[in-house]
């Protein structure tokens, strides 16, 4: 049996990413974002939605650049911390013992411990109510080669990525299928009739 609740965001789990910004004053900041995702493939585009009251909103608005840093089990504490403590009060890179890596295209520090860093340039800023959506073109992607196999394929699952659902962080666990497996023809085994 199901009951009806008032309208709300029940699209869970969601990614929990660290977004890095740099203000016009040159100060780097990190904050946690759950409202994020892909918008388009060609050109590659993503979005983040941020409350205007967040410290990093002004840096995003003023500079139009940011980096999305994917999170892992090992980054869970930093992910939570950067979501509940303001950058107005302290340097979160330093407090969380995170390594700054300078972006190659946009002037922003990325998280060295993240398996994937996505450099972004804002193309549109849209006020939606409680949040402002920053739609952005992906201008560079950096991946940790520790998660590449001998054929060059990248395996993010080996980095133990995390997601967020209703106040709790989760690692992604074991795979339960791969794209297209439901229609893929089974391979015949050699030597079997």
Image (cartoon, rainbow, N blue to C red):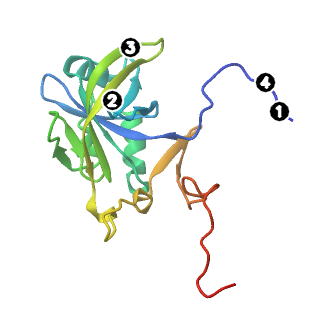
Q: Indicate which disc residue 2 carries.
A: 1
Q: Indicate which disc residue 4 carries.
A: 4
Secondary structure category for the residue under label 1: loop
Residue at screen point 58% across, 84% down: 190
Q: Residue 155: where, in percent of width, then height?
A: 40, 60
Secondary structure category for the residue under label 2: loop
Q: Are marks 3 and 2 in contact (CB under 8 Å)?
A: no
Q: Which residue is mark 2?
A: 86
In the image, 109 versus 148, the foreground residue is: 148
Secondary structure category for the residue under label 3: strand
Q: Earlier in the sequence, mark 3 or mark 2?
A: 2
Q: What's the CA distance linking mark 3 and mark 4?
A: 30 Å
Mark 2, other Cα within 10 Å: few <14 / some 14–19 / many ≥20: some
Q: Residue 48: where, in percent of width, then height?
A: 39, 28
Q: Is residue 136 above or below residue 68?
A: above
Of circles 1 and 3, which is in front?
A: 3
């Amino acid at each position: 049996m199901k009951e009806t609740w008032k309208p709300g965001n029940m699209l869970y789990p969601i990614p929990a990413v660290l977004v890095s910004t740099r203000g016009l004053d040159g100060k780097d900041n990190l904050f946690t974002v759950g409202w994020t995702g892909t918008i388009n493939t060609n050109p590659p585009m993503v979005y983040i939605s941020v409350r205007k009251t967040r410290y990093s909103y002004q840096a995003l608005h003023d500079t139009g650049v940011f980096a999305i840093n994917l999170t892992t089990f090992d980054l869970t504490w930093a992910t939570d911390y950067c979501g509940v403590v303001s950058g107005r009060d302290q340097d979160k890179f330093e407090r969380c013992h995170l390594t700054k890596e300078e972006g190659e295209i946009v002037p922003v520090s990325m998280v060295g411990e993240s398996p994937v860093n996505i450099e972004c340039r804002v193309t549109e800023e849209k006020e939606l109510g409680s949040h402002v959506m920053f739609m952005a073109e992906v201008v560079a992607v950096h991946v940790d080669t520790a998660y590449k196999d001998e054929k060059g394929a990248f395996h993010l699952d080996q980095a133990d990525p995390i997601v967020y659902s209703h106040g709790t962080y989760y690692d992604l666990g074991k795979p339960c299928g791969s794209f297209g497996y439901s229609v893929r023809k089974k391979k015949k085994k050699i030597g079997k009739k």
